[in-house]
């Protein structure tokens, strides 16, 4: 949205969590349920994700829920009268497609895929344009029945800061770390999931002179535990939720993280080699397979494997550099700009002739 807002001429944008807005109680319940499933029963999500049997069996129920949950969304759209609607998740694609199918709205609808995979819940004939992370995923979307003219490759949009290059030493000094020590960034995604603390504990014993930046995200319990454990360790910096991930990645030599779509794309844009830990079944597993297939990451399924992987990369810098080069071949640091231009082009294409002649601003 920021790229659209700062485009010339600027494009006014409004961000809405469609599930929470459409039904606040249901939205909060779904968010909590999703997080609990990921924490305690990820195998359940593995069964549900991209399962054609589940997709077919729940189609009527989903259609009914879309009708039930679209009232407030329809009112919002009538109030703002947007020139285009952009969705970055499959659920709002279903909600908005239901409105379009019933003739309630005619607004162009764009779906931006933010993982290196696609499932049938994304696919609807009401979507005017799909923006995909790679050519591989573009072909998959077309095989699922979307006309080729409605699918474009832009990459996963990330903040343009991730495409800029800074100075590792300066960023490390800003964190109070040594400018010369090899630096490892450890994250568990926005929710601080995975063996973040155990990973740092295991790696502290490696005789490599490592220093660590550890991000606990919104997981306050994890951040408190990390501060208790490493608060006095001058070679470990602990952060909670932060908007400076691009600077932390610039300061680092290796990223240890779950492979969320945005995290993965940000690391690729920064040229930061990645070690994958505990991917969530479904979308993160797809992301992991994509990176591994292209030689842009390594995977560690146990702490012992993690220790061996980190030791191997820092003891054989050529391998580390190869991961970096393979990642740069996949990187699309200017994906947000390309996605913005694709959205604006669609709006211009769908703008009525009279509006184009009068030069009405894009809304």
Image: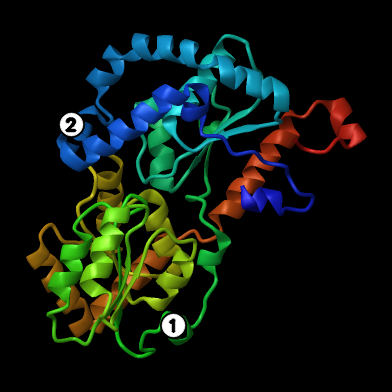
Q: Quadrant of residue 96?
A: top right
Of pointers 2 and 1, the one earlier in the residue sequence: 2
Q: Residue at x 43, y 47 (%)?
A: 135
The spot of residue 182 in percent (x, y) is 29, 84
Q: Is residue 139 above or below residue 120?
A: below
- Count residues near mark 2 (Cα–Cα under 10 Å), then give few for <14, some for 14-19, many for 20+: few
- 362 with respect to 139 (left or right): right
Q: Quadrant of residue 234?
A: bottom left
Count of numbered tags: 2
Image quarter hosting the C terminus: top right
The spot of residue 157 in percent (x, y) is 52, 51
Q: Residue at x 27, y 13 (%)?
A: 57
Residue where numbered disc 2 is placed: 44
Q: Is residue 184 above or below residue 186?
A: below
The dot on residue 168 is 1
Q: Quadrant of residue 274?
A: bottom left
Residue 104 appears anywhere in the view = yes
Q: Residue at x 64, y 27 (%)?
A: 108
In the structure shown, which secondary structural element does the residue marked by tag 1 occupy?
helix
Nearer to me, 117 or 190 = 190
In the structure shown, which secondary structural element does the residue marked by tag 2 occupy?
helix
Nearer to me, 291 or 212 = 212
Q: Residue at x 63, y 47 (%)?
A: 340
The spot of residue 87 in percent (x, y) is 52, 34
Label 2 – label 1 distance at C-alpha:
41 Å
- 285 with respect to 345 (left or right): left
The spot of residue 292 in percent (x, y) is 25, 57
Residue 145 appears anywhere in the view = no
Residue found at the far right of this picture: 358
Q: Is residue 292 above or below residue 84?
A: below
């Amino acid at each position: 949205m920021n790229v659209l807002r700062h485009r010339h001429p600027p494009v006014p944008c409004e961000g809405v969590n469609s599930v929470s807005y459409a039904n606040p109680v249901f939205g909060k319940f779904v968010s909590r349920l999703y997080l609990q499933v990921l924490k305690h029963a990820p195998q359940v999500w593995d069964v549900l994700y991209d399962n054609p049997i589940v997709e077919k069996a729940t189609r009527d129920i989903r259609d009914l829920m879309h009708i039930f949950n679209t009232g407030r969304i329809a009112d919002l759209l009538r109030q703002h009268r947007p020139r285009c609607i952009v969705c970055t998740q499959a659920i709002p694609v279903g909600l908005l497609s239901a409105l379009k199918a019933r003739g309630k709205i005619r607004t162009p609808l764009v779906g931006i895929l933010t993982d290196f995979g696609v499932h049938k819940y994304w696919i609807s004939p009401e979507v005017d344009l799909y923006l995909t992370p790679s050519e591989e995923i573009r072909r998959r979307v077309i095989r699922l029945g979307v006309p080729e003219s409605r699918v474009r490759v832009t990459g996963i949009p990330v903040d343009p800061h991730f495409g800029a290059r800074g100075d590792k030493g300066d960023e490390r000094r800003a964190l109070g770390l040594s400018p010369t020590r090899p630096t490892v960034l450890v994250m568990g995604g926005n929710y601080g999931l995975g063996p973040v603390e155990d990973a740092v504990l295991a790696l502290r014993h490696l005789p490599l002179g490592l220093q660590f930046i550890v991000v606990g995200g919104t997981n306050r319990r994890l951040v408190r535990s990390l501060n208790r454990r490493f608060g006095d360790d001058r070679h470990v910096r602990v952060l909670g939720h932060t908007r400076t991930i691009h600077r932390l990645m610039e300061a680092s030599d290796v990223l240890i993280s779950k492979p969320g779509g945005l995290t993965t794309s940000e690391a690729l844009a920064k040229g930061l080699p990645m070690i994958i830990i505990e991917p969530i079944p479904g979308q993160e597993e797809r992301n992991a397979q994509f990176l591994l297939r292209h030689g842009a990451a390594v995977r560690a399924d146990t702490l012992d494997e993690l220790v061996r992987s980190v030791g191997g990369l820092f003891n054989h810098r050529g391998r580390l550099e190869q991961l970096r080069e393979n990642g740069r071949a996949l990187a699309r640091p200017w994906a947000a700009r390309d996605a913005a231009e694709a959205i604006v082009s669609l709006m211009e294409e769908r703008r009525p002739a009279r509006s184009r002649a009068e030069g009405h601003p894009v809304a």
